[in-house]
Image (spheres, rainbow, N blue to C red):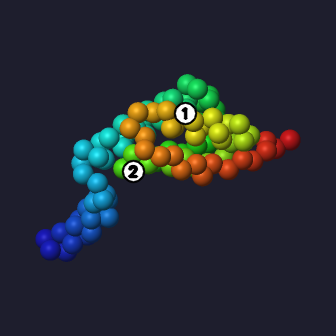
């Protein structure tokens, strides 16, 4: 029994985000969902699949690749407009479409 308990505790500790409360985690999940939804409707579904969204303590991090600097800026503006977003970290890379 002890041998089973140790890996389970290690997994639970690894999966927990101890830097925020359960309410904060729920709020971040809601922010992430809203940002993804707004990106899909404002920028387009095909572009959104190349962008990952993460939210922690209201700080949204965008990462991935888009075809133009305009799309990168639009993604940041869309994310910043979502309620409860404190700041946006835009790590999106601009890469030209292959010919």
- Across and down, in percent, residue 8 comes to 23, 65
Image quadrant where residue 70 sits: top right
Q: Which residue is mark 1?
A: 78
Circle 2: element type:
strand
Identify the disc placed on residue 37: none
- Across and down, in percent, residue 13 comes to 27, 65
* Left or right of residue 41: residue 8: left
Q: Nearer the viewer, residue 87 or 17?
A: 87
Quadrant containing the N terminus in the rendered view: bottom left
- Across and down, in percent, residue 93 comes to 68, 50
Q: Is residue 4 visible?
A: no
In the rendered image, the residue lying farthest to the top is: 41
* Left or right of residue 61: residue 26: left
* Left or right of residue 6: residue 98: right
Q: Which residue is mark 2?
A: 56
Quadrant containing the C terminus in the rendered view: top right
* Rendered position, 69 above or below 4: above
Q: Residue at x 58, y 48 (%)?
A: 90
């Amino acid at each position: 029994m002890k041998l089973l308990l140790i890996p389970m505790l290690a997994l639970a500790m690894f999966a927990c985000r101890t830097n925020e409360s359960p309410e904060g985690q729920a709020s971040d999940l809601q922010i992430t969902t809203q940002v993804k939804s707004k990106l899909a409707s404002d920028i387009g579904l095909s572009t959104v699949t190349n962008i990952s969204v993460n939210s922690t303590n209201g700080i949204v991090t965008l990462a991935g690749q888009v075809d133009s600097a305009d799309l990168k800026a639009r993604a940041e503006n869309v994310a910043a407009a979502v309620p409860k977003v404190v700041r946006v970290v835009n790590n999106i890379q601009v890469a030209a479409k292959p010919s």
